[in-house]
Amino acid sequence: MCLGLQPQGTVTNNLDLNDNNGDVNPDAIEICDGIDNDSDGLVDEGVMITYYADNDGDGYGDAGNSIMACSAPSGYVSDNTDCDDAKFSVNPGSEEQLNNGVDDDCNPLTDDGTLGIIDNSFMLKISILPNPFYNELNIYFSEQLINKVYKVTLYDLLGKRVLSLENQNITGIIKIKHLERFQQGIYMIKISDKDTEAYIIKRVVKF
């Protein structure tokens, strides 16, 4: 005859994924420790931190190269404001050097005394449309500027880099898509010749 008595040491649910660890159960708070604390089948969900590669060792990370982890792996930092992670001397903590054609402090709004233009007609050979833009920008190059690798960087008015890419310009057009995620406002776009490091900066407006 069943008397409906619950045996000692048993419960009426089977939700615990690790019954050998009293800290692991569906009511536990997930912490970043490599364990599924809350028994939901996921490990460290929602609690890992984004770290960014610091290849040049200057303490500033590359926003385009990141990893999720509980603590910073070797070669990674929590900062993501380095605009050239291959040069130790280029980062937001550096002082802008005059007339060297390099954005030393990662702020395109800082005057370095030169636009780094290859020749006086270089700026006239590049156009950016549409401007204002919503979800796409097209950079048009003259025939003389085709078959070069260009680095395109977009900054907000605080000087923060919000987008960076490199492109082999074969057709005379570099298309930048999926820009609808950016907030409305004024941005500065920097177009650099990767080989010569010459560059121009133009203002674009997101609507």
Image (cartoon, rainbow, N blue to C red):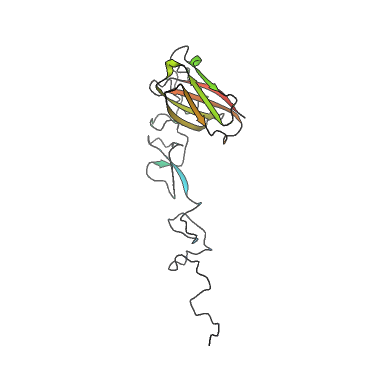
- Can residue 187 be seen here? The reply is yes
Residue in the picture at 52% in, 70% down? 13
Q: Establish if 178 lies above or below 39.
A: above
Q: Nearer the viewer, residue 23 or 67?
A: 67
Residue at image x 47%, y 50%? 48
* Image position, residue 101 (x, y; %): 43, 20
In the displayed structure, 113 sits above or below 35; it is: above
State the quadrant of the C terminus.
top right
Q: Residue furthest front?
A: 171
Q: Nearer the viewer, residue 140 or 124?
A: 140
Query: Residue most toward the top?
Result: 120
Q: Is residue 158 shown above or below 7? A: above
Instruction: Say which residue appears at 54% left-offset and 26% top-offset.
Output: 188
Left or right, residue 104 beside residue 186 = left
Q: Which of 29 and 57 lies nearest the eye of the viewer?
A: 29
| Residue 92 visible in the current orientation | no
**Image point (53%, 22%), residue name:** 128
| Residue 135 falls in image quadrant | top right
